Amino acid sequence: MLTAAERRRGIGAGLTVLAAVLLFVGTAVATLLAWDGDQSASRLFTSYTWSILRFTLLQAALSTLLSVAFAIPVALALARRPRFAGRTWILRLMALPMGLPALVGALGLLGVWGRQGVMNGWLNTAGLEQPVSVYGLSGILLAHTFFNIPLAVRLLLAVLERLPAEYWLLSASLGMKPVSIFRFVEWPALARVVPGVAGLVFMLCATSFTLVLVLGGGPAATTLEVAIYQALRFDFDPPRAIALAFLQIALTAAVIALIALLPAATDTVRTAGRKVLRLDGRSAASRLWDGLIIAAAVIFVASPLLSVLVAGLRADLWKLVNGPRFIQAATTSLIIAVTAGVIAVTASLAIITARQAIKDRRDPNLAERLLSISLAGTSSLVLVVPPIILGTGWFLVLRQLGNVAPFAPYLVAIINAMMALPFAVRVLEPALQDHRHQTARLAAALGVTGPAKWRLIDLPVLTRPVLTALSFAMALSLGDLGAVALFGSSDLVTLPWLVYSTLSSYRTNDADGLALILGAICLALTILGTAGQKEHKHA
Amino acid sequence: MRGISTFLLAATAAVLAPFAAKAQDKTLTVYTYESFTSDWGPGPKIKAEFEKTCACTVNLIGVADGVALLTRLKLEGEGSEADIALGLDTSLISEAKATGLFEANGIEKSAVKVPGNYADDTFLPYDYGHFAVIYDTQTIKTPPKSLKDLIEGDTSQKIAIQDPRTSTPGLGLLLWVKAVYGDKAPEAWAKLKDRVLTVTPGWSEAYGLFTKGEAPMVLSYTTSPAYHMVEEKTDRYQAASFSDGHYIQIEVAGMLKHAKDKDLAKSFLTFLISPAAQDIIPTTNWMMPAAATSAPLPDAFDKLVKPANTLLIGSDEVAKNRQAWIDEWLTAMSRK
């Protein structure tokens, strides 16, 4: 129910974003391919390439399965208990792992699960002589679930929380059992977003680098991303790096396409917008179950973070904050994170609006349908384009203009924004969809359009998902080291870079302290992301 | 929203502007690796000392590591601003020469003294270190006494090593095993594999695992204990002395062919091996000086392992075989 002008504007915005993303990636790839150097004519598809491909697929598929399978009961439990002391803090906690550089997360995990970790300490007291080793596939799965269960919980919970109050009233008056509620109410809602969430987690795991190497125990555990990095950084063989990158993109696209084939219920939700009151789950058994599930999730996510906290507190934090480069690094990190976040959210809104504008037409033509599919594909797959390829490609482009240094922060912000795009789309799309279903007809009937519509109808409801998406994108950018590492560090110092730099100067303690500060900043950002949580409850 | 992002980008540029190169009459641009330029690294002090003598500005640009440095030079080619590249190592020299971007420096280098008497007319050694297994004396009472010992020892005592595909110390261990075992290297790796806790992408991750107690041994340098003795006043971490020799990493600096002011570049290289610069290196870069210092090194350096036997494979041979040797390593280490 959009006016023709709204539809045109929507499609136009989508086209602009699509063109911008393709141009940005295409320029980098084309420049690298055109670069003529002394390339070693190394074979692309050795048996080793195939074994990497197999392992990438295996670990990413298992990680995704585990993350989503564990996230569902946690999200259901949290949705069933809309108010209990500390709930908001649990949600904030769930946003933290994403903002941590992979190495910090890995060291935190090892503090709990490692050879000298808390777990093995207990096992040792219990009489076990040799520590249980996590290195290998189990370590990789552990790390990936630590980083991705919280992510999946947040995305799934957002959908459950938007279910209209009428559903719960109706299910209570029908006397529905928990199983029926799950089957008829909760699952149909989850099924709408599970493919998207699974796809996102799969992409994150498939392109994992540091976690896979540190916890994988040896080169048998390697992802394509490692091979791409080697090809470009160590061998400087751009054609090989790009061929491997295309392999990675094709692999992910195939998996995402498979996931998209899963039957997804397209449920349109109508509500009078009354206050949500959950009437189910009042039994003692249900309370116990939810309590256990939530406690387990909190312990799993919080314990490595606690280990980061304990290690960090040993450092002289005051001295670190007053260190010569800290303020510079923190400012640069924040500016890049805000810029990346704003770009990602703006681009996501454009993509979603365009897709809705196309869906809104009764019979979209082939070009429009293609555009819709391209937008969905691009906004996902952009995450698996290796940042090192974008960075190196653009470095070559900008070289021709002179000094690259002034452009570096822009590039890092854009690369981070592209990485955050799939997150932002997944946070915003379900929210926007529901919102349109609920308001489009009425708005059209009342003739409210343009800025007035945005201010009166969209803004009040969409502030919260927009803030959540923004905090997602900012946290991701804040914890990202990859994009920055490509440029000279004296030009561009960010917090994760400072952590690494400190570590590479033997100063492990200071690095722990900086990691803690980074985590604290991230927590502050997630407070932004969960803002509006309270107002919503009283709405 | 677009307005906001434009504003933020402008703000970013404003914040970063002071760090862009300032135009001066005479500047010397030195490309190096990140830990050299860090606050604790030798960079800031060397820059200050040299600027006292040259009436010029030294512009230090730090990239991730020696490999990234070479890649950056390859990317920039003849148009690079770099006058000096500082931080390549012996295994990269052949590749660096093949770029055709460097020029013989022609300076007087009789002061340089590095084990194995490495000498080159283009690349000037400024420090060196021997790779070594560093162990935690609180966990390991009988450290390995040779590479053979390490490879055949107790597999419950683990070591963290680095990946030769992504890090220079990782490549160093690969060459070390090759230098000792030659054609039998794959068998050696297949045995060592069970002792390897994990293979990290870079030195920092492995060393972090070590200092956190996760791995009782790590591949690093003979000079690493000096850091702990000098800065942390502890001799808990020690290097294991290997009777079959230690592989050496010599760090070198070279002058680029298109350097703007070659006399200035040459005087910087001369300065680099003078006592004024060599005095700075040991306690900031934690490597051995490549030429005489004005005063004896801190006591901690006397306590370090002094390898009787230095191992080094020529850089041409490394360049020619690196990929094949890495493939060999991958196969041996990936076997179940």
Image: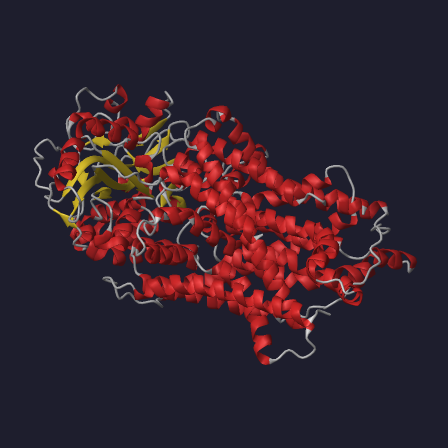
- Vertical position of residue A17 compared to residue A406: above or below: below
Closer-to-camera residue (B94/B107): B107
Q: Residue at x 43, y 28 (%)?
A: A323
Q: Residue at x 41, y 29 (%)?
A: A324
Percent x, y for residue B89? Answer: 22, 43
| In this rendering, position of residue B289 left or right of residue A113 | left
Percent x, y for residue B272? Answer: 18, 32
Q: Quadrant of residue B306?
A: top left
Is the image coloured rainbow, by chain, by secondary structure, or in one colour?
A: secondary structure
**From where the camera sits, is residue A498 visible?**
yes
Q: Residue at x 40, y 34 (%)?
A: A502
Closer-to-camera residue (B207/B240): B207
Quarter of the image where the N terminus of chain A is located: bottom right
| In this rendering, position of residue A123 left or right of residue B118 | right
How many circles with numbers are drawn on the protein? 0
- Vertical position of residue A78 compared to residue A440: above or below: above
Percent x, y for residue A180? Answer: 82, 61
| In this rendering, position of residue A504 left or right of residue A149 | left
Q: Residue furthest right?
A: A173
Percent x, y for residue A197? Answer: 62, 59
**From where the camera sits, is residue A134 visible?**
no
Closer-to-camera residue (B61/A58): B61
